[in-house]
Amino acid sequence: VDDARIALQALADRVEGIAHPTLRLGVTGLSRAGKTIFTTALIHALTKGARMPVFEPYQSGRIARAELQPQPDDAVPRFAYEGHLEMLGAERRWPSSTTRVSELRLAIRYATRRGSLKTLTLDIVDYPGEWLLDLPLLNMSYADFARQSLALARAQARAEVAAPFLAAVADAPASGPADEARAREVAARFTSYLSACRSERLAMSLLPPGRFLMPGDLEGSPALTFAPLDVEDTPSRADTLGGMMERRFEAYKHAVVRPFFRNHFARLDRQIVLVDTLSALNAGPAALADLERALDGILAAFRTGRNSLVSTLFRPRIEKVLFAATKADHLHRASHDRLEAVLGRLVERARERAQDRGATLDVVALAAIRATREARVRRGGHELDAIVGTPEAGQEAGGHVFDGEEEVAVFPGELPADPDALFDPSGAGFRGLASSMAGNGQDDVDFRFLRFRPPADIGDGPIPHIRLDRALQFLLADRLT
Ligand code: GDP
């Protein structure tokens, strides 16, 4: 039934697309990866202009203008572009992040290479990447899910934060009575464990079920009161705690994961996946390994549906996927290619394992909004490459509390020329990363986690960015010829 509905929707979208060529672009990534900022910057660049030498249709002057349009789907909230821009401009603060799906439609008027005027309708769909990591659950039984989740929780990197949750699991035998209070207790501990994994220190990525972290409008709903238990492979008896959890897990798949797949994901043509690679690098090898597994899961999500009726009747819907390492303005220009290489490496391994040859993939390191500038600073007789920005108020480094007004020069660590070094099981690559920062004379102060305020004077004028134009060239240019 699902497949038929997806196929019908795809057909309707196509018919609509004949009259009005339309591209549905998904913007996703885990929480804090930079979706809200990217989407805001993208809309601003297309409607107000920006410096985008690499985005050919724009650079050559063929894009006349892009305009905001009423969105097609009445049931989906609109992306709060104006509010976000106001916050960035008037208050010089980062707007609040994505917590649910939202949409915005742009009409891009452009001249084809031959000179005729056309319009491409661009539907931008911003949604939490946590929800994407749920798609693999569709092919899992409760027993599979429980086994995998518990194995992850018991792994060394997570064992410490998982302890209270694992204790609750030990106290909740799957064959025991189906007790609501106990189910709530385990689910609550499971949820706290998942959010603890997301902390800056651990920066873990692979944490399904996604709605436990990003409930959207399901906050507090019974669909979210299950947790993995130690269960046998065979389905648990209905009147046991295991049976109760299993029913709720199935309900979650049915009521939450499937509708998301059908109503949003299956309708996307292209996708940008934003990845906060720097946070994972800062947190260490375990976070990086976890991110790799999460990206693996995300790539698997893009294959979901390929073998279905949809793909036999129609071309695979998602034709292009761009993985983007965000916040590249935290690094000096010299490291941008290296950051790209690290992400390329993360995706490459996932791809090899998955043997995925469907959609076209690319990687880029970008800053949708550039909050820093580069400078050369003298330190102990040497000139060093530094980045200069205004740290957000209230943060502390080396005993100094920033007031949100002063500018500081930071020496970002140097990423290794060969990304393989970071994946070396001995951890040598990470020690190199740490010592490259220590060598810059800031071993006593951890500047790596500083958050900078957005640049001053965001308004109608161009917003500074890094490689946003490269992203647009990959995602849009071939539809604007
Ligand atoms: P979301 O949860 O994916 O929607 O993440 P946001 O777009 O809200 O970004 C989370 C935070 O990351 C922001 O509040 C900023 O502090 C930071 N951030 C995002 N994009 C950029 C960027 O391009 N440059 C810098 N310096 N910081 C960014």
Image (cartoon, rainbow, N blue to C red):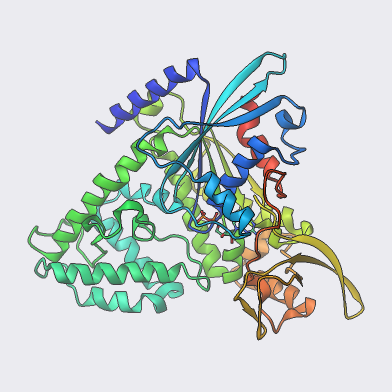
What is the residue that sits farthest to the front in this orientation?
90
Residue depicted at x 50% and y 71% = 202
Q: How many numbered dots are placed on residues in this image?
A: 0
x and y percentages locating residue 339 in the rendered image: 68, 56
Q: Is residue 238 visible?
A: yes
Q: Whereabouts is ligand 1, in terms of quadrant?
A: bottom right
Residue depicted at x 29% and y 54% = 218
Vertical relation: 258 (above or below) 455: above
Q: In front here: 326 or 407?
A: 407
What is the residue that sits farthest to the right in this orientation?
381
Q: In front here: 178 or 411?
A: 411
Q: In front here: 407 or 15?
A: 407
x and y percentages locating residue 199 in the rendered image: 48, 70
Q: Is residue 348 visible?
A: no
x and y percentages locating residue 158 in the rendered image: 42, 73
Q: Quadrant of the C terminus?
A: top right
Q: Quadrant of the N terminus?
A: top left
Q: Based on the displayed image, in which of its 4 quarters is residue 335 positioned?
A: bottom right
Q: In front here: 131 or 377?
A: 377
Vertical relation: 275 (above or below) 240: above
Q: On the rendered structure, is 34 left or right of 170?
A: right
Residue depicted at x 45% and y 41% = 78
Q: Based on the displayed image, in which of its 4 quarters is residue 404 positioned?
A: bottom right
x and y percentages locating residue 456 in the rendered image: 71, 57
Residue depicted at x 31% and y 68% = 190
Q: On the rendered structure, is 79 left or right of 147?
A: right
